[in-house]
Amino acid sequence: MRLVTGFGIGVSLVTVATLLQPRFVAGSIPDGVFELILLPGKLLAVPFHDRGTASPEFLWRSRVFGSMILSVITFLVLPARKMSRNVTSV
């Protein structure tokens, strides 16, 4: 369950940032927050230059990498559920 939650949060963060960032003025605080959310994926996608950083190939790679990185971070931050043992004595 922790893995699914981490994946869902990572994908949701990248999706929301991708959809909402163009609505804000460049250099504004919300734009900067969205840029920070998308930054890990852009950094990992840089070695795979196709036709520049605005090409569709670069954008889908950066979003996939960003989702993966944020999913792993979320997975590591979420607390692991402890197994409780119900021991009954006779």
Image: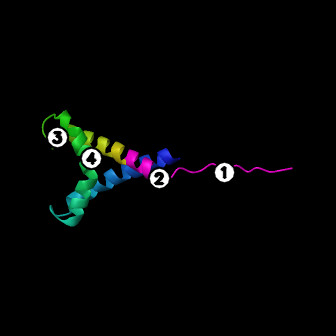
The image quadrant of residue 24 is bottom left
Mark 4 in CB contact with mark 2 (< 8 angstroms): no
For marks 4 and 2, give the CA distance: 19 Å
| For marks 3 and 1 on the same chain, the one whose residue lies earlier in the sequence | 3
34 or 24: nearer the eye?
A: 34
Query: What residue is pinned by disc 3?
Result: 55
| For marks 4 and 2 on the same chain, the one whose residue lies earlier in the sequence | 4
Query: Residue 21 at what x, y percent from top left?
Result: 23, 58
Q: Disc 1 on helix, strand or loop?
A: loop
- Name above or below for residue 85 compared with residue 55: below
For marks 3 and 2, give the CA distance: 34 Å
Mark 1 in CB contact with mark 2 (< 8 angstroms): no
Query: What residue is pinned by disc 2?
Result: 78
50 or 85: nearer the eye?
A: 85
Assess whether residue 76 is covered by the magenta stretch. yes
Query: Residue 83 at what x, y percent from top left?
Result: 63, 48
Q: Residue 40 carries which label?
A: 4
The image quadrant of residue 64 is top left
For marks 1 and 4, give the CA distance: 37 Å
Assess whether residue 38 is covered by the magenta stretch. no
Q: How crowded is mark 1: few (under 14 residues within 10 Å), some or many (20 or more)?
A: few
Query: Which residues are drawn in magenta?
Result: 71-90
Amino acid identity at mark 2: Leu
Amino acid identity at mark 3: Ser
The residue mark sitting in front, 3 or 1, is: 1
Query: What residue is pinned by disc 1?
Result: 84
